[in-house]
Image (cartoon, rainbow, N blue to C red):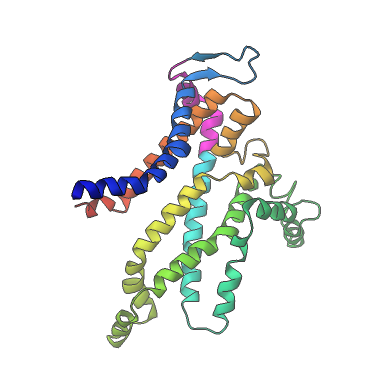
Amino acid sequence: MPLLKRWGLLTWTWPALAFLLAFALYPLGYALVISLFRYRLTDPTGSSTFVGLQNYIQALQDPQVLGSLGNTLLFVGVASGLELILGLGIAVLLDQRLPGMGWARALLLTPMALAPVVAALVWRALYNPDFGLVSQLLGGLGIPLGRGLIGEAHTALWALIWVDIWQWTPLLAITLFAGLQSQPPELLQAAQLDGANSWQGFRHISLPLLRPVLVIALLLRAMELFKIFDSVFVITGGGPGRATEVINYHIFKVGLTFFDVGYGAALSVLLMGILLLFLAFYGWAVGWGDRAP
């Protein structure tokens, strides 16, 4: 009977397994294979040469790769940290029984309703050094802009980070707000009866109970930020110079602009390895291993 149950379960799950093999594992395996070849679509002979790990060695010694990876890590660290802090503050505010909170929650979802490319186009217009609203406001405050926020190397990446914070902080706020709403109110009421004020109740009861939600929300947001591409492509195109060139945009240039698909595949595999290392470190840092049976 257990054997029949297993076969029955396999019968129901094989379509999902076939889908996974076709659309996930096969592209990954193909990328691994061509990353071992010198394969350029601009080569008139159309030939490819097996080079082993040469593409990977070249990537680790390429200053452009290291620079774009540094921009990516800065983007992920700053954006995820600020989005978490701001999202937590907004979630606590939404959790208060204040008038107008229902409307505030609805308005909070507005930035997320926009497609990332559309949001990037809007912010590119706002950042325009000639007629953009942001440029006019900063100019009115007497802040020197030069070629504008996205035209200067020392401000362009921060301008892109702000766009991401504007669009995706509401996601963390709503997630954390749901976490606060799921907590039993009796615990805070008991703490208040014992003389705890609002801050002490939040610090010692609400925040520890919210920790699992915080961990998952931060992990998912950081994973998404590693894939940042749309705003870079639309707003700055990686410039000025290479000031905003993140690793995904660099891979796009290598594979689909210079058509060096072998080297581009090696960069993609390296990025996947970095993400796996990040997940392993993150799991160790938050103590997932302590819960293993």
Q: Is residue 287 magenta?
A: no
Image spot of residue 217 (x, y percent): 43, 58
Residue at image point 30% right, 49% down? 9
Point out the stretch of residues depicted in magenta. 51-69
Residue 90 coordinates in the image, percent (x, y): 51, 70
Residue 255 shows up from this direction: yes
Q: Is residue 281 visible?
A: no
Going 37% across and 74% down the picture, which residue do you hit?
202
Please state the horizontal and vertical placement of residue 242, each as a whole percent of the image.
63, 36
**Which of the 4 image quarters holds residue 138?**
bottom right
Q: Residue furthest top?
A: 45
The residue lying at 61 percent from left, 15 percent from top is: 46
The answer to whether residue 196 is left or right of residue 34 is left
- Work out whether 59 lies above or below 14: above
Please tell me which residue lies in front, 212 or 90.
212
* Figure quadrant of residue 163: bottom right
Q: Position of residue 125 (x, y in %)?
A: 75, 53
Whether 91 is drawn above or below 283: the answer is below
Total marks shown come to 0
* Rendered position, 113 above or below 47: below
Q: Is 64 left or right of 184, judged from the image as shown? A: right
- Residue closer to the observer: 174 or 153: 174
The residue at the point 22 percent across, 51 percent down is: 292
For the view shown, which residue lies furthest in the bottom direction? 193
What is the magenta segment's predominant secondary structure?
A: helix
The answer to which of 17 and 179 lies nearer the viewer is 17
Magenta stretch contains residue 66: yes
Q: Could you tell whether 47 is left or right of 203 in the image?
A: right
